[in-house]
Amino acid sequence: MLNLVLFGPPGAGKGTQSAFLVDRYELVHLSTGDLFRFNIKNETELGQLAKSYMDKGQLVPDSVTISMLEDAVNKNPQAKGFIFDGFPRTHGQAQALDAFLEGRSTGITSMVALEVPEDELRVRLAERAKTSGRPDDADPSIIQNRIDVYNAETAPVKDYYEGQAKYQGVDGVGSIEEITDRLVGIIDAL
Ligand code: AMP
């Protein structure tokens, strides 16, 4: 299986690039943010809980997030592999994902990280807010909170995969096509 963690701060382009990569490598795209938004739209209990964190730009608790992600993997038994987008976002999630995949006799092939400077993220998220309809894109103080949470809790997940020699950084600034080409270059060489 080819199992990729597509990593990077909010606004790095993970969703945009995932769309190309799932087609090219025939992978299943699992975005925990999308799964939460689906639950919010369908007014589930999980959606209600997730919304109370997402609206503030905070992380949804690990226990809830991990079991939701595992359910989503279990629903795709025929998958050739997965792109994990927006997960893992904490050290605990990374450990849980390894244990879960090991139980299925597979593992993470690589973490591929889109590296984008903070100023550029703020500009991109403000631009995305015009069309995304996402409440967490609309308010600059919530955007800043998401970036701060990323720096404090999520960025260290890089060290976890570096420790396994699985981290690959990619320059995330440029045209969409240029960045896709960089990602493909890395993934093809795996
Ligand atoms: P995203 O669509 O990846 O930008 O995620 C939007 C929001 O969903 C985040 O700001 C968090 O509140 C929540 N979220 C998404 N993925 C996770 C995760 N792996 N762990 C905790 N919260 C998450």
Image: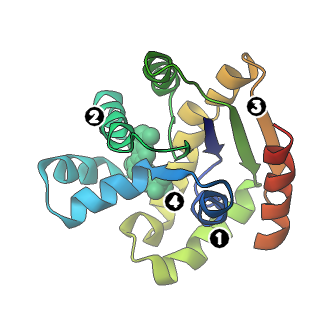
Q: Which mark is residue 104?
A: none
CA–CA distance in space, label 1 to label 4 = 11 Å
Q: Which residue is mark 1?
A: 124
Image quarter in which the N terminus is found? top right
Task: For marks 1 and 4, give the one nearer the viewer.
Answer: 1
Looking at numbered disc 3 in the image, what kind of residue is underneath it?
Tyr
Q: Which residue is mark 4?
A: 143
CA–CA distance in space, label 3 to label 2 = 26 Å
- Disc 4 secondary structure class: helix
CA–CA distance in space, label 3 to label 4 = 26 Å
N-term-proximal mark, 1 vs 4:
1
Q: Is mark 3 within 8 Å of ligand 1?
A: no
Image coordinates for residue 77, horizontal then vertical, percent: 39, 39
Task: For marks 4 and 2, give the one nearer the viewer.
Answer: 2
N-term-proximal mark, 3 vs 4:
4
N-term-proximal mark, 1 vs 2:
2
Q: Which residue is mark 2?
A: 64
Looking at numbered disc 2 in the image, what kind of residue is underneath it?
Val
CA–CA distance in space, label 1 to label 2 = 29 Å
Q: Which mark is residue 167?
A: 3
Dot 2 alpha-carbon crowd within 10 angstroms: few under 14, some 14 to 19, many 20 or more:
few
N-term-proximal mark, 4 vs 2:
2
Report whether 87 appears left or right of 122.
left
Dot 1 alpha-carbon crowd within 10 angstroms: few under 14, some 14 to 19, many 20 or more:
some
**Which is more toward the observer, 95 or 71?**
71
Image coordinates for residue 38, horizontal then vertical, percent: 29, 61
Report whether 181 appears left or right of 21.
right
| Above or below 143: residue 128 | below
